[in-house]
Image (tube, helix red, strand yellow):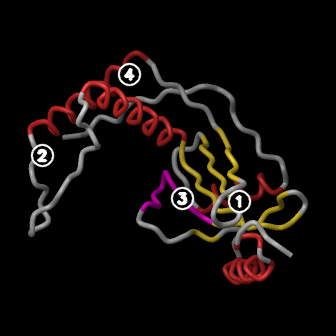
Amino acid sequence: MKYPNDGFLPQNIEKLKQELKSSNQSFKIIPSEDNTDEYVNFYFIGKYEGKEVIYDAVLYTLRLHYQSELYELAEHEAAKKFPNYEGIKYNEDENGNLIPLKTEEEEIGWFITEMIMDMEEEGAVKVQEFLDLDTHHDFGIGLDAALNLESLDEKAIEEFVEAYNEDSLELDDTFYTFESEEEED
């Protein structure tokens, strides 16, 4: 039998089942420095078209989704204003200290910051909870979801997996904006 990718292979599903059983959890966090209390990449087993499959899931907070949307729009505006803009890259010296940005990069950085502040003030970006599936993912089924939670912990992930697998996940269709957290002195 031909499988779309290795996340559909019965032996891989069985291996993950054993790992989940021994850890007494319904999910396995994929080790990554990207994982935070607002973003988590993990595997879980669920059904797709009546068959078991491994889901390669990314769950993040609605606040992080909002901030990403703001930054993406600001970068888009920066690319229109600065034709040479290809992203700002921070480099470190041999002691691990940040090397100052070039003048144009610094100017672009300030432009992006101002764009974000203006969009926040105007309420230009609104986000809502969502779930997207990628059936052409490189491993299993890709799943991206943003939930209106303060942070993500094992309990939140467990509840998400349970609700998804029981087809009882209810997404809030309210649109939200968030305020940037002011840095404290």
Taking the image as shown, residue 85 lies to the left or right of residue 176, namely left
Helix, strand or loop at mark 1: strand
Taking the image as shown, residue 58 lies to the left or right of residue 178, namely right
Helix, strand or loop at mark 3: strand
Q: In the rendered structure, find residue 40 and report the number of the disc placed on it.
A: 3
Marks 2 and 3 in Cβ contact (< 8 Å): no
Q: Over which residues does the magenta segment extend?
A: 34-42
Q: In the rendered structure, find residue 101 and report the number of the disc placed on it.
A: 2
Helix, strand or loop at mark 2: loop
- Earlier residue among tags 4 and 1: 4
Closer-to-camera residue (49/119): 49
- Earlier residue among tags 2 and 4: 2
Q: Quadrant of the N terminus?
A: bottom right
Q: Quadrant of the C terminus?
A: top left
Q: Which residue is mark 1?
A: 141
| Residue at the image point whose x is 58% and y is 68% from the top | 29
Closer-to-camera residue (70/154): 70
| Residue at the image point whose x is 87% and y is 65% from the top | 51
Task: Give coordinates of residue 103: x percent, y percent.
Answer: 9, 38
Magenta highlight on residue 86: no
- Earlier residue among tags 1 and 2: 2
**Crowd around label 2: few <14 · some 14–19 · many ≥20 (10 Å):** some
